[in-house]
């Protein structure tokens, strides 16, 4: 007999249930971070007066919006979280999505080493976390998917506050 992890069921229930009356709003930002600009999309339910903050961090293949906020009904994890009381911030690490691309990306791949290190990704997370906390005056949670989970752990291992 196969056993199912109860936490998986909770997450699936969260993703599959719907909240009536939600009015989802999206707003895109470019956050200055030294020589780079980081793209952040805020997704929130206009009717939720006291949302909790959540930063969603993409993996190594796609940027944040294609990973978490597809413009197709029922395919936006960011909107699903917003409907359940979160103010969601979908971020792009440098080199992904609409964030600044390293200059080396203009060159053939064989001319460059890997373009974004774990330390640089952790620095980008630090920049976005600081911006979210200043914007909302609240602490935030961080959820990384695939490489984003690795980058989130590197950020937290550097003893950074959320």
Image (tube, grey):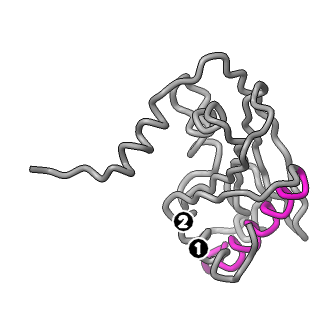
Q: Determine the image quadrant of residue 134.
A: bottom right
Q: Residue at x 67, y 75 (%)?
A: 155
**Along the horizontal axis of the image, is 18 left or right of 138?**
left
Cβ atoms at labels 1 and 2 below 8 Å apart:
yes
Q: Label 1, secondary structure: give it.
A: helix
Q: Residue at x 72, y 21 (%)?
A: 23
**Along the horizontal axis of the image, is 25 left or right of 70?**
right
Q: Determine the image quadrant of residue 116.
A: bottom right
On the image, the x and y values in percent for residue 52 come to 72, 46
Q: Quadrant of the C terminus?
A: bottom right
Find residue 149 and name its label: 2
Badge 1: residue crowd in 10 Å (few <14, some 14–19, many ≥20): some
Q: Residue at x 61, y 28 (%)?
A: 71
Q: Is residue 87 above or below residue 80?
A: below
Q: Which residue is mark 1?
A: 153
Q: Is residue 12 visible?
A: yes
Magenta-tinted stretch: 109-135
Q: Which residue is nearer to you in this view: 52 or 74?
A: 52
**Along the horizontal axis of the image, is 12 left or right of 28?**
left
On the image, the x and y values in percent for residue 150 come to 54, 71
Badge 2: residue crowd in 10 Å (few <14, some 14–19, many ≥20): some
Q: Is residue 111 visible?
A: no
Q: Main secondary structure of the magenta part?
A: helix
Q: Label 2, secondary structure: give it.
A: helix
Q: Which residue is nearer to you in this view: 150 or 35?
A: 150
């Amino acid at each position: 007999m196969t056993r199912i992890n109860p936490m998986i069921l909770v997450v699936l229930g969260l993703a599959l249930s719907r909240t009536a009356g939600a009015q989802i709003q999206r707003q895109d930002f470019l956050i200055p971070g030294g020589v780079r600009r980081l793209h952040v999309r805020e997704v929130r339910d206009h009717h939720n007066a006291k949302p909790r903050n959540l930063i969603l961090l993409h993996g190594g293949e796609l940027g944040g919006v294609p990973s978490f906020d597809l413009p197709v009904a029922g395919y936006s994890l960011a909107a699903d979280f917003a409907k359940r009381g979160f103010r969601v911030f979908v971020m792009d690490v440098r080199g992904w999505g609409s964030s600044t691309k390293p200059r080396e990306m203009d060159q053939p791949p064989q001319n460059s080493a890997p373009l974004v290190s774990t330390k640089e990704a952790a620095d980008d997370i630090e920049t976005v976390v600081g911006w979210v906390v200043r914007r909302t005056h609240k602490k935030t949670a961080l959820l990384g998917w695939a490489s984003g989970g690795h980058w989130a752990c590197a950020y937290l291992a550097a003893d950074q506050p959320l």
